[in-house]
Image: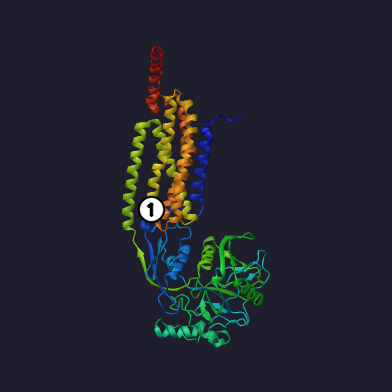
């Protein structure tokens, strides 16, 4: 037989909440890096600010439309969810990217904004200072399997120690994935040294690295590879001509490659996503083309089975898989020894790499968090004062029920902390000052839910019911009000999150998250605790429960009611 409306099995609800807490903190301590601390925004922990200056191919000032499009693409690339704390702001013809954290190399990589292009790999050698022995048609360093492409999928590791991935169908590829017979021989020990940075040296290096003879002249290939220094900063970043071949390094600086002209640009990519590999360990990147890209990719892969294709972003090879078979469906899968982070970075580079403008990095600086910490201290002091006032009011007005309010708020804090850690680990959420403000406001929302319940409880007691019998009836009436109020708060937070930009998104996110957690606490903690308190003779005493005034009102009303009835009859 089902229990009457409003009745609850308190221990079952509390056990469910305990299970949730155990699962959350198990994920906190036993997954990821195991560090139990949330990610902080740039205003709380400092970070990096990169300024990119836009340049058009014609040299004319970039249009406002192209700048805005570039800003949107980079914003999706560095801060797709809007809650990672990264910001992309347009300042004249500049884009200012602000990234929280103490990883400047990652911030620099976010500024890679050149157009993505697909090129055929003509030849490749390891990026070493010593000449490697040639093995005929196969370049040195090819003992490691090369990336491959085939079917609706493609990928295989490169000659670098850690493979970039391969393009392969869902089943195990059967192709050998060797590069073409025109692979460049390794540079000889007599090759000229790499040119030093400087206007003339850069011009000379560009002429060598982008010479039409690279496609067919092995001496030119040898010279181009010899002038490459994969460990040094590349002065030619963003200056490659897609119509000419290119001598460049892979992204990790472990391999030198000779590439043909761009046969397909990144604008033909409709989508790229990272996901777990269903055929084995690790992660894969699924790549989809649209428009003429489907036909171009099918024709290229059909004519170049067994050869390699390079995905080039800002003169750097993001991935260079080899082709297992013709891919005619417009969908390609890059597989290999990817971690989740590596697969996601590759997917982002492929999906968001193409921009309508070229950018050069004009400023790079580290941002201090000193001001942020002072603001955080002020915010926390304000929050603690507000929380203290709420608790003092509840203890004075509700007594034992006020103690339950304090306990519920403490448990809310435990859940919020675990959720912040996990969100920072899984979706890149960073807690900034705006987010702290959202949590402070959420204290009022949570306390409001308790007050609605307790006031309904007093109403039932005033009508003559005992504490124990009043709990289920008051819960039924209060539950509707709590759900309605939280629904309005969550809807407001959701609309604000959709329409807002920057740190306001973080404020809206924490406000909405706190509203959801408020329902969890009220249903699984506060209501069961009040139900247990109503079953205790000690806690049910009028002086301790905070319901004495309501009970005295009921007694006074009962005494006054017969006299009023008699007076009416006599009249």
Residue 528 in picture, x, y percent from top left: 49, 34
Exactly how many numbered labels are in the figure?
1
423 up-or-down from 257: above or below = above
Q: Is residue 56 left or right of residue 242?
A: left
Relative to 570, say whether 226 is above or below.
below
- Residue, disc 1: 434
Question: In terms of image quadrants, where is residue 334?
Answer: bottom right
Where residue 66 sits: x, y (%)? 45, 70
The residue most toward the front is 571
Report the colour scheme: rainbow
Q: Identify whether 336 is placed above or below 6.
A: below
- For residue 412, which quarter of the picture? top left
* Any part of residue 441 in sight: yes
Q: Residue furthest top?
A: 570
Residue 248 location (% of width, % of height): 51, 78
Q: Nearer the viewer, residue 449 or 38?
A: 449
Q: Is residue 144 visible?
A: no
**Position in image of residue 434 (x %, y %):** 38, 53
* 335 relative to 9, above or below: below
Q: Closest to the observer: 38 or 497?
A: 497
Q: Secondary structure at mark 1?
A: helix
Q: Quadrant of the N terminus?
A: top right
For mark 1, does the 10 Å Cα neighbourhood hold few (<14), some (14 to 19), or many (20 or more) residues? many
Q: Nearer the viewer, residue 538 or 446?
A: 446
Answer with left or right where residue 45 lies relative to residue 267: left
In the displayed structure image, the side of residue 241 where residue 41 appears, left or right: left
- Quadrant of image for the C terminus: top left
For image coordinates 44% across by 30% down, the residue present is 457
């Amino acid at each position: 037989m089902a229990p009457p409306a409003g009745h609850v099995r308190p221990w079952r609800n509390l056990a469910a909440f305990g299970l949730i807490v155990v699962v959350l903190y198990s994920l906190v301590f036993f997954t990821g890096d195991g560090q139990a601390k949330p990610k902080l925004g740039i205003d709380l922990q400092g970070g990096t600010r990169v300024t990119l200056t836009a340049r058009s191919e014609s040299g004319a000032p970039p249009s406002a439309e192209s700048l805005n499009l570039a800003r949107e693409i980079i914003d999706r690339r560095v801060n797709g969810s809007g809650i990672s704390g990264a910001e992309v702001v347009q300042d004249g013809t500049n884009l200012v990217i602000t990234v929280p954290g103490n990883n400047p190399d990652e911030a620099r990589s976010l500024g890679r904004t050149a157009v993505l292009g697909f090129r055929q790999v003509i030849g490749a050698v390891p990026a070493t200072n010593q000449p490697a022995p040639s093995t005929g048609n196969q370049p040195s360093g090819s003992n490691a399997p090369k990336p491959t492409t085939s079917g609706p999928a493609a990928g295989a590791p490169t000659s670098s120690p850690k493979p970039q991935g391969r393009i392969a169908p869902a089943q195990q590829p059967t192709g050998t994935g060797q590069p073409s017979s025109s692979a460049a021989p390794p540079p000889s020990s007599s090759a000229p040294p790499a040119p030093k940075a400087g206007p003339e040296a850069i011009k000379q290096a560009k002429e060598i690295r982008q010479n039409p003879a690279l496609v067919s002249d092995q001496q030119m290939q040898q010279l181009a590879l010899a002038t490459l220094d994969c460990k040094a900063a590349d002065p030619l970043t963003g200056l490659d001509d897609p119509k000419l071949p290119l001598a460049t390094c892979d992204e990790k600086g472990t391999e030198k490659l000779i590439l043909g002209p761009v046969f397909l640009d990144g604008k033909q990519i409709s989508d790229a996503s990272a996901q777990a590999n269903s055929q084995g360990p690790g992660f894969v990147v699924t790549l989809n083309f649209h428009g003429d890209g489907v036909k171009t990719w099918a024709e290229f892969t059909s004519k170049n089975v067994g050869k390699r294709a390079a995905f080039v972003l800002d003169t750097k090879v993001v991935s260079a898989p080899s082709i297992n078979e013709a891919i005619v469906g417009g969908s390609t899968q890059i597989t290999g020894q990817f971690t989740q982070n590596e697969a996601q970075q590759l997917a982002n580079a492929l999906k968001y790499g193409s921009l309508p403008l070229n950018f050069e990095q004009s400023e790079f600086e580290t941002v201090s968090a000193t001001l942020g910490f002072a603001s955080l201290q002020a915010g926390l002091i304000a929050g603690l004062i507000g929380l203290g006032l709420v608790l003092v009011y509840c203890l004075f007005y509700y007594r034992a029920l006020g103690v339950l309010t304090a306990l519920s708020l403490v448990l809310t804090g435990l859940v919020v902390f675990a959720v912040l850690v996990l969100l920072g680990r899984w979706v890149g959420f960073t807690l900034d000052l705006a987010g702290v403000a959202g949590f402070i406001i959420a204290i009022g929302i949570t306390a409001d839910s308790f007050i609605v319940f307790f006031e309904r409880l007093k109403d039932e007691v005033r009508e003559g019911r005992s504490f124990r019998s009043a709990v289920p009836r008051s819960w039924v009436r209060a539950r509707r009000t709590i759900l309605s109020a939280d629904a309005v708060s969550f809807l407001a937070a959701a609309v604000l999150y959709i329409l807002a930009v920057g740190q306001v998104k973080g404020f809206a996110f924490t406000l909405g998250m706190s509203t959801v957690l408020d329902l969890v606490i009220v249903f699984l903690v506060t209501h069961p605790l009040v139900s247990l308190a109503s079953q205790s003779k000690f806690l049910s005493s009028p002086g301790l429960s905070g319901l004495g005034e309501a009970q005295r009102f009921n007694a006074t009303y009962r005494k006054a009611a017969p006299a009023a009835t008699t007076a009416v009859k006599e009249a």
